[in-house]
Image: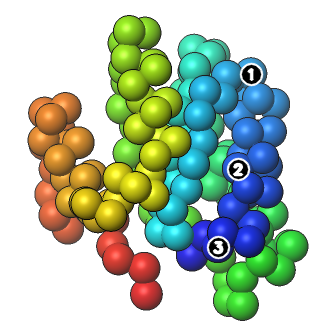
Amino acid sequence: MIDKTWNEKLHGYITGIVQNNKHKMLQINSMPDHIHIFIGLDPEQSISSLMQRVKTDSSAWVNDNGFCDSHFSWQKGYGAFSYARSQVDTVIRYIQNQERHHRRKNFLDEYRQFLTAFEVDWDERYIFKEPE
């Protein structure tokens, strides 16, 4: 779980990973059970390669710094969606307002809605799980 006492440090660390891999961080924000990262992707690296780096390096960083009482790790998988340049400001505002937004809709319901809106075929067995 991402705690408010260290989430800004996590955002900064992940921003460094993104920038060190030659991508542009447009917005980052997290809730206790998930994180949103909005980037301008450099086509020299695949999103899967970048996400593997972000998840591996940030998990190690959280654990090395002792931010959690137990071992921290991200769940398997990730969701990635593309947006038109004309939608950048809307997506940034959406990510900035995560706390208010999730008072109305939880993450898993929102994620299913994204999958449907983007016409992604999905199987409930492979959807993220509630944190234990």
Classify mark 3: helix, strand or loop. Answer: loop
Q: Secondary structure at mark 1?
A: loop
Residue at the location (60% across, 42% down)?
Answer: 28
Calculate the distance from the C-alpha at mark 3 to the C-alpha at mark 2: 12 Å
Name the amino acid type tagged 1.
Lys
Q: Earlier in the sequence, mark 1 or mark 3?
A: 3
The residue that label 1 is drawn on is: 22
Does 8 sit above or below residue 64?
A: above
Mark 2 lies on residue? 11
Q: Nearer the viewer, residue 130 or 110?
A: 110
Q: Which residue is mark 3?
A: 3
Q: Can residue 22 be seen here?
A: yes
- Based on the displayed image, in which of its 4 quarters is residue 49 positioned? top right
Query: Which sits earlier in the primary sequence, circle 3 or circle 2?
Result: 3
Q: Amino acid at mark 3?
A: Asp
Residue drawn 79% across the image and 49% down it: 13
> Residue 37 vs residue 123: left or right?
right
Residue under the point 68% across and 89% down:
70
Q: Amino acid at mark 2?
A: His
